[in-house]
Image (cartoon, rainbow, N blue to C red):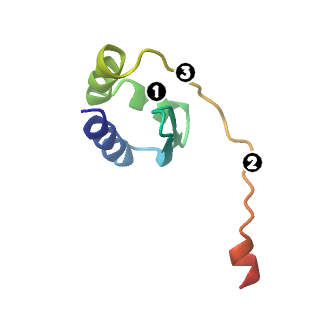
């Protein structure tokens, strides 16, 4: 049920105003991280209080997670290096 809910939340987030992207990884031990990117704090707030997202949050606390951390941060700068692209 977790994978279905997670997939649905990502699909739902992608069509919300202000959504910029998402990255998620999960280890074999089940521990993972999902980072979603939003245009501004209003977009973050609107996603936090979205009715279907609220249901998923409740399910997460009741069924999926024994603990989690939530962080809201601002990306000040972003730099990348791609050795493969540089070689072309």
Q: Secondary structure at mark 2?
A: loop
Q: Secondary structure at mark 3?
A: loop
Question: Observer-nearest residue: 34 or 28?
Answer: 28
Residue at the disc numbered 3: 69
Closer to the N terminus: mark 3 or mark 1? 1
Residue 56's disc is none
User: Label 2, label 1: how many angstroms apart (C-alpha)?
Assistant: 22 Å
Mark toward the viewer: 3 or 1: 3
> Which residue is depicted at the point 75% across and 56% down?
79
Residue at the disc numbered 1: 45
Question: Observer-nearest residue: 56 or 18?
Answer: 56
Image coordinates of residue 83 in percent, x first then y, are: 74, 72
Q: Is residue 77 left or right of residue 57?
A: right
Image coordinates of residue 32 in percent, x first then y, are: 50, 35
Q: Residues within 10 Å of mark 2 (few under 14, many from 20)?
A: few
Q: Secondary structure at mark 1?
A: helix
Residue at the disc numbered 2: 77
Image coordinates of residue 80 in percent, x first then y, are: 73, 60
Q: Is residue 33 above or below residue 25?
A: above
């Amino acid at each position: 049920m977790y994978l279905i809910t997670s997939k649905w939340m990502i699909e739902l987030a992608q069509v919300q105003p202000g959504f910029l992207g998402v990255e998620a990884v999960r280890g074999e031990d089940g521990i993972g991280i999902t980072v979603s990117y939003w245009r501004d704090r209003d977009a973050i707030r609107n996603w936090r209080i979205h009715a279907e997202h609220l249901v998923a949050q409740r399910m997460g606390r009741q069924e999926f997670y024994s603990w989690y951390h939530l962080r809201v941060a601002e990306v000040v700068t972003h730099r990348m290096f791609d050795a493969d692209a540089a070689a072309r």
